[in-house]
Amino acid sequence: MKLLKCMAIKLTSNEIAQRVLEKAVSSVQLLSGVGAGGGVRSSGEAALFHRLKAARGGNGFCIFDVGANRGQLTFMWPIWISMAA
């Protein structure tokens, strides 16, 4: 493991490699929906809610919305709860 780490550091400790890595990270984040600007209705939170509810067998659970935006996710929970009932 140490050898692989040393090789990775040597291979990526230059400007060109750092640009390539930055582009790769940006691409993966975009594909994951990070920074895509999607709304809570279309960005996967509804699917997450339904999975959580199914995993709990319909029992209650507590969710902390720690997003840095305006609370759209918290606003949508009551709507999703009524749709799933």
Image (cartoon, rainbow, N blue to C red):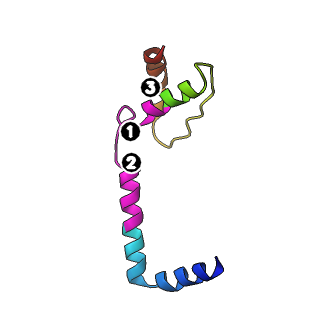
The reply to whether the magenta stretch includes residue 29 is yes
Tell me the residue at 34%/45% (across/down): 37
Q: Determine which of the numbered discs, if any, sits on residue 33 in the image.
A: 2
Which residue is identified by label 3? 76
Gap between marks 2 and 3 measured at Cα: 18 Å
Marks 1 and 2: CB-CB under 8 Å? yes
The reply to whether the magenta stretch includes residue 55 is no
| Vertical comparison of 6 with 84: above or below | below
Q: Amino acid at mark 3?
A: Met
SS state under label 3:
helix
Mark 1 or mark 2: whose residue is earlier in sequence = 2
Front of the two marks 2 and 3: 2
Mark 3 or mark 1: whose residue is earlier in sequence = 1
Q: Which residues are magenta?
A: 24-48
Marks 2 and 3: CB-CB under 8 Å? no
As drawn, the residue found furthest toward the right would be 2
Q: Amino acid at mark 1?
A: Ser
Tell me the residue at 43%/77% (across/down): 18
Query: In the rendered picture of this protein, how many numbered marks are placed on residues?
Result: 3
Q: Determine which of the numbered discs, if any, sits on residue 43 in the image.
A: 1
Q: Residues within 10 Å of mark 1 (few under 14, many from 20)?
A: some
SS state under label 2:
loop
SS state under label 1:
loop
Residue 64 screen position, x and y as percent: 60, 34
| Vertical comparison of 83 with 28: above or below | above
* Nearer the observer, 37 or 10: 10
Q: Quadrant of residue 62?
A: top right
Q: Quadrant of residue 63?
A: top right
Residue 52 screen position, x and y as percent: 55, 30
